Image: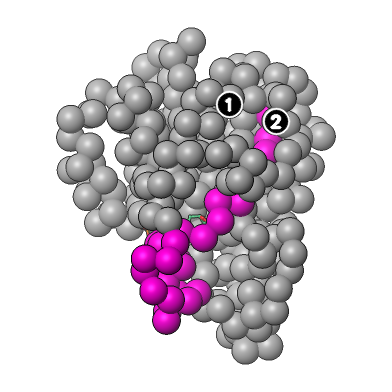
Amino acid sequence: MKPMVLVLGAGSGLGRALVRFFLSRNISVSCLTRSKESLTSLMDESADFKSLLSATAAFDYCDRILSEEFVRRLVSGKESTDFPGLAIYCAGYLSGRRSLLETPVEDADREIDVNFHAPLYWSTILSRHFLERGVGGHLFISSGVASTLRSSWGAYGIAKAGVEALSTQLSLDLPAPLFSLSLNPGGMITRMRQIAYPEEKRDTLPAPETIGDKIGRFCMERLLGGGRAYNGRRLTVGDIA
Ligand SMILES: NC(=O)c1ccc[n+]([C@@H]2O[C@H](COP(=O)([O-])OP(=O)(O)OC[C@H]3O[C@@H](n4cnc5c(N)ncnc54)[C@H](OP(=O)(O)O)[C@@H]3O)[C@@H](O)[C@H]2O)c1
């Protein structure tokens, strides 16, 4: 079966690096960005790989109507194999690194919506389609603040802990060969990292492309076409390097 990956949050950082990785390995990709600008620049830089780009769209992935419409597009793909065998949840939002007490309620809500509610919703709908096809899995991009809650990570930390719980729950509910796992990518120089640590020197951490190569290779070697051995795992990038 022709492998295909769905990258949610492909506009920048790790998601974008993963799209580049898969296209360069001849893997079909379907992707979602939030802003039209980031989708346009992604399409421009991927012009040589047009035939590998399946459904693409730019919208807020917390929007349930647009999300459902997008999944319908995936389901009605040209071929029965045109449905992702792996969904990677990269989209993330951090309003700032601060305590819950200092975070405006609407910012905390948004962090929970983007980092937890949307993955919960998407993974539930996608799981039903994986079940029908008898193939498919979820890779949730987590964070170090999920396994050990730390001061000043507020609603973002809570949402990431929730995503790890979501992945574990799915792993218990999905029958073989379906699977779900989470992966903490570790620190990377991205837009989100700059929001968390504005003073940090840019050369002290890896670029998202470096981490994207490791995660992309792991997906190709271990997950695409059979990730059940990793079902329920909560990995860090050190586990796969
Ligand atoms: N950077 C780190 O050090 C670090 C460490 C641990 C975990 N992580 C995790 O790694 C993942 C990738 O983050 P990153 O560091 O690569 O940050 P990033 O460059 O800020 O990328 C975040 C991506 O999420 C997309 N996004 C945000 N809200 C969205 C929404 N409502 N709908 C659709 N897409 C949305 C953005 O799209 P647009 O570009 O279109 O706005 C952007 O492409 C996140 O889950 C983050 O929590 C990062």
Closer to the chain start, of discs 1 and 2, is 1
Decide: is 115 above or below 132: below
Residue at x 46% of width, y 19% of height: 3
Extreme top residue here?
1
Q: What's the residue at 62%, 30% (across, down)?
A: 137
The magenta-colored residue range is 179-205
Kind of residue at badge 1: Leu
Could you say which quadrant of the image residue 146 lies in? bottom right
Is residue 204 on the magenta stretch?
A: yes
Secondary structure, mark 1, is: helix
Q: Which mark is residue 210?
A: none
Image marks 1 and 2: residues in contact by CB distance under 8 Å: yes
Q: In this rendering, would 164 be left or right of 90?
A: right
Viewport quadrant of the C terminus: top right
Say if residue 199 shows up in the picture.
yes
The CA distance from mark 1 to mark 2 is 8 Å
Mark 2: amino acid? Tyr
- In percent of width and height, residue 234 lies at 71, 44
Is 100 above or below relative to 7?
below
Q: Position of residue 177 (x, y in %)?
A: 70, 19
Image spot of residue 165 (x, y percent): 76, 50
Q: Is residue 121 visible?
A: no
In the depicted structure, whether residue 93 falls above or below residue 235: below
Farthest residue in the bottom direction? 102
Q: To which residue does mark 2 refer?
A: 230
| Residue 30, horizontal then vertical, whole percent | 39, 34
Using the rendered view, name the quadrant where residue 128 is placed: top right
Q: Residues within 10 Å of mark 2 (few under 14, many from 20)?
A: some
Asked whether 126 falls inside the magenta stretch, the response is no
**Nearer-the-camera pick, 144 or 55:** 144
Q: Which residue is mark 1?
A: 223
Provide the secondary structure element on which disc 2 rests. Answer: helix
